[in-house]
Amino acid sequence: MNFLEAKKVVKKFANHTALDKVDMEVPENSIYGLLGPNGAGKTTLIRIINQITGPDEGEILFNGRPLQPDDVHHIGYLPEERGLYKKMKVGEQALYLARLKGLTKNDALKKLKYWFEKFEIQEWWDKKVEELSKGMQQKIQFVVTILHEPKLLIFDEPFSGFDPINTNLLKEEILKLKEKGATILFSTHNMESVEELCDHITLINNSKTILHGAVDQIKQNFKDNIVELTFTGDESLLRSKLTEPFSLRNTINLNSHTKAFIELGDTGNINQLLKTLVNDIEINGLTELLPSMNDIFIKVVNESNQTGPADAIHA
Amino acid sequence: MSKIGLIITREYTTRVKKKSFIVMSIIGPLLFAAMFVLPAWLSSMGTTSKKHIAVIDETNKYDNVITDTESLKFTMLQSDKEQKIRSEYKDMGYDAYVVISDDLLKDPDAIKIYSDAPVTIDMKQHIKRDFEKYLEKEKLESFNIDGLDNIISNINNTTVHISTIKLGEHGSEEESSTELTMIVAIVFAMLIYFFVLMYGTQVMRGVVEEKTNRIIEVIISSVKPFQLMMGKIIGIAMVALTQFLLWVVFTIIIITGIKFALFPNGEMPTRMDDQIEMVQASGGQNANVAQNSDFADEFTKIMKKANSLDLLGSVLAFFFFFIGGYLLYAGLYAAVGAVIDNETDSQQFVMPIIMPLILSIYIAMVAFRAPDSDIAFWFSMIPFTSPIVMMARIPFQIPTWQVILSMAILVASFIFTTWFAGRIYRTGILMYGKKVTYKEIWKWFRYSGK
């Protein structure tokens, strides 16, 4: 079941269209990547989901029904442009932000105590925010975002400003939140973390969806059907054995063995390839080469920029 | 607690806890007190040095016309010494010298004061007054009237004290004072001007702070932008009212303090009686040497007069017009804060807001001299100037329908400006790093309507 759906959402600003009939289906309890180049319209879509602005056309379904004002209590939002009141004390401020999300004072205090202990930041409670480093402030911000145990979490570039240790800590927490049942919408330019965390993605470019689907499926769709074969034996023998539909791209000679990159062609598959080769050369390993999300992102966005908007590719 | 309540509480507590607020609360009343005490103190400093002035009378007619005072000593010199005096008056211990070259009845310009330092008005006035009195007498004497001395002393004893009696609603008569009313009027008008300017700017700063801190998006994912704006405006209004109440309380404490200092032992070290004389309707005599008991009397009088003014009415009206005027401007200040990225850019947008405020102060100056004039009336109806101009008129007991009409217009107007500002605000707060023009703002305004 989809926990969050965007249906043909259109948002126009005075001089340009930020979102042009964008659809998105976020399955419940998944980590969903919202990708796209700068200025594609991601932040606008996120702001519409947060009811910071409203769509001109289309609608957002939250948990199967149209989005309502009180739903903000079930959403945790960590915006890209984020900050805290510099002159306010950490504890006071966390309490204030938590209560704005609808928690009672006692609930908020109890939960804050838990998270401050967990992150070992209790001694920051009475410090002013301006006394903390940027990374420390980001931690507080993260705690405040998830404190009210929202069913939907929206992270816009969550890792910017974190050092590798804290980035890891954050990733772990995000995965734990998913285990606990939260649905997570995740907007980032960091494709590594997309591959690491996301189950599904939507790619927006120039206000339109140009690609969406499950990450595994997308990779399958964009693969070039190339395998990397590591073997010991005669390279010319390999060459002679590879006939239609297979073809050899190139080889790399290493000390004891050789790496060959083989195109499977339209009809070939790995089993056939193995059958063809298994009697003649000694096979050390065989891996299917899948494109990285980074490659796919660049490829799809460039194509869409050249050819103009086409129908979204569904994987 | 509702969300807007939470916002109001935050805006209020963070500001009230600030050192600057506490300092202002204490310094405000002290400044008021200083306004009374300082001039007295300074003038008492000024009288310590005595000035010697030489008088050269070439006509030999005006011997001992000029009397000495506490700070001025006059010495008549032979007229033939003029040349010597001209060059050596300083060495001879004089600060200035006066030359009378002809009969002043024939030539009123025949008297001159020479000095290398500027001549004080007090000194000039003193000499002028003495001569005028003397010449008047001389003229009268030329008519050769019998018993002239008696007549003159009789004439000099004539004084008129005009008391203004305000007729109360129940036919009761109370003593009131036009001058005191004027002071009350202008103080209230200035207070509104000051509070609207100061706390309006605070609203703007608050909005800019949220923008530059980048906390704005976090907050408006929990509350509506309009709630945030209103919470801030109301929270800061409560800070302003707290400040005002503290000032009232402290001022009352200071006044009571003066009362206690006066009546038990009768000691009053300042020239306060001069101030009282100023506000008193009588054409009072020179009161440089005031009796302590006189001061106590005057103090009682002034308190009585203050009581007869409709102070309670003025204070209630003050609260209304302060809140109304503040709300009218605060929304606009919030919109400006939303439009700009940092305070240094605020100038071009703040100017149009401040202009009517400054204009109202000028109109108020007219209004409290002529509270029923057309200009006072119309500007006390125009909402952008009405809070200040109306406060300058209210102590003069203007018709009630005018007050009510002005209030109604003000309420309608602040609802409009708040709505107008809200639309600009909710677009502006999400715009970072953009140079904004008026044209752009108009676009936002229209856009938000969709």
Image (cartoon, helix red, strand yellow):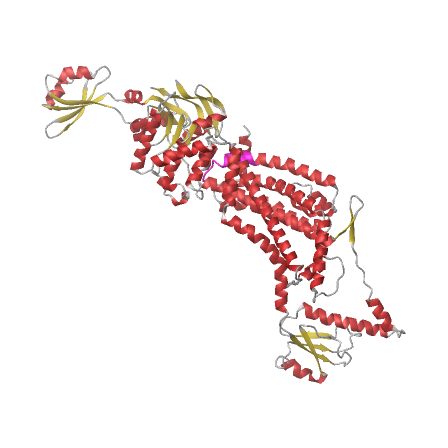
* Residue B120 locus on image (x, y percent): 66, 69
Q: Nearer the viewer, residue B144 or B48?
A: B48
Q: Is residue A187 magenta?
A: no
The residue depicted at 63 percent of the width and 40 percent of the height is: B324
Q: Nearer the viewer, residue B73 or B83?
A: B73
Q: Is residue A48 visible?
A: no
Query: Which image quarter holds the C terminus of chain A?
Result: top left
* Residue B40 locus on image (x, y percent): 64, 63
* Residue B252 locus on image (x, y percent): 63, 51
The single residue placed furthest to the right in the displayed view is: B146
Is A190 situated above or below B382? above
* Residue B103 locus on image (x, y percent): 78, 77
Q: Which residues are magenta?
A: B421-434
The residue depicted at 70 percent of the width and 57 percent of the height is: B299
Query: Which image quarter holds the N terminus of chain A?
Result: top left
Q: Nearer the viewer, residue B339 or B280?
A: B280
Q: Is residue B433 magenta?
A: yes
